[in-house]
Image (cartoon, rainbow, N blue to C red):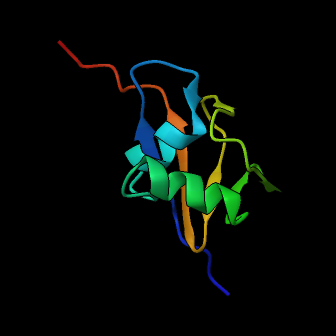
Amino acid sequence: MTRSPIQDIELAEVPIRLGQFLKLAGFAEHGAHAKQLLEDEEVQVNGRIETRRGAQLHIGDVVVVGDLRARPVAPQQQDQ
């Protein structure tokens, strides 16, 4: 079975709350949807089920919802 690629989400600031990240990554349409995903234990962070909307994510943490995977990354430096 092939796993989906991990989507890199560039963040201006870290840490970020899990609920915010779910919306930013497109896993949740709005805050209430993020809350429901967490309550239904559909969210994993680094291989463990996470139910806290305010859990802090750091660069490199892997978030999984169903077949979707994403991780926060530092912003790319702009060449001048």
In percent of width and height, residue 62 lies at: 65, 48
> On the image, which quarter does residue 47 sit in?
bottom right
Instruction: Pick the residue in front: 41 or 69.
Output: 41
Query: Does the image show residue 7?
Result: no
* Residue at point 59%, 39% (across, down): 18
* Residue at point 44%, 47% (across, down): 31
In percent of width and height, residue 71 lies at: 55, 45
Judged left or right of residue 29, residue 68 is: right
> On the image, which quarter does residue 1 sit in?
bottom right
Is 44 rendered above or below residue 14? Answer: below
Outermost residue, front direction? 32
Counting every numbered tag in the picture gives 0
> On the image, which quarter does residue 16 sit in?
top right
* Residue at point 39%, 21% (across, down): 12
Instruction: Pick the residue in front: 24 or 46.
Output: 24
**Quarter holding the C terminus?**
top left
Outermost residue, bottom direction? 1
Is 47 rendered above or below residue 68? Answer: above
Is 34 rendered above or below residue 20? Answer: below
* Residue at point 62%, 52% (across, down): 63
In percent of width and height, residue 43 lies at: 67, 59
